[in-house]
């Protein structure tokens, strides 16, 4: 009896399993999307800091005599170093 039920309804059973699988996949995708969104929001302060550092380094001109000190001195200056 069970064998006849499975044989007669195999397409319906497969369709139900496929629908269930798609539902689980959708829930998983939404969960992953939320996790990535939260992670990216956590990096916003770091991103803002990096942007201000880049702007400061671009605007900073550190000259010692005739030689430019270069990027390390600019970074040092932008992070509060110096006299």
Image: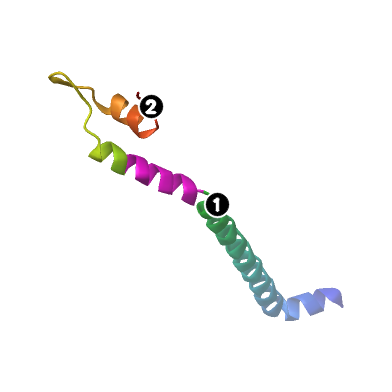
Place of residue 74 in the rendered image (x, y in percent of width and height, measured from the top left): 29, 30
Q: Residue at x 61, y 69 (%)?
A: 22
Q: Residue at x 66, y 66 (%)?
A: 24
Position of residue 59 relative to residue 36, above or below, is above
Q: Which residues are magenta?
A: 43-54
Locate residue 38: give its quadrant.
bottom right
Q: Residue at x 65, y 67 (%)?
A: 21
The residue identified by callout 2 is 81
Place of residue 31 in the rendered image (x, y in percent of width and height, measured from the top left): 62, 61
| Structural crowding at the residue carrying mark 1, measured as other residues with C-alpha within 10 Å and reported as few (<14), some (14–19) or many (≥20) | few
Closer to us: 25 or 9: 25
Is residue 46 shown left or right of residue 18?
left
Q: Quadrant of the C terminus?
A: top left
**Mark nearer the N terminus (1 vs 2):** 1
Q: Residue at x 36, y 44 (%)?
A: 52
Closer to us: 32 or 53: 53
Q: Main secondary structure of the magenta part?
A: helix
The residue identified by callout 1 is 39
Secondary element at tag 1: helix
């Amino acid at each position: 009896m069970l064998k006849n039920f499975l044989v007669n309804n195999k397409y319906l059973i497969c369709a139900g399993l496929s629908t269930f699988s798609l539902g689980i996949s959708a829930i998983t995708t939404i969960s992953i999307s939320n996790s990535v969104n939260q992670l990216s929001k956590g990096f916003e302060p770091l991103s803002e800091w990096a942007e201000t550092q880049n702007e400061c380094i671009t605007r900073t001109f550190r000259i010692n005599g005739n030689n430019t000190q270069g990027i390390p001195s600019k970074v040092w200056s932008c992070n509060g170093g110096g006299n």
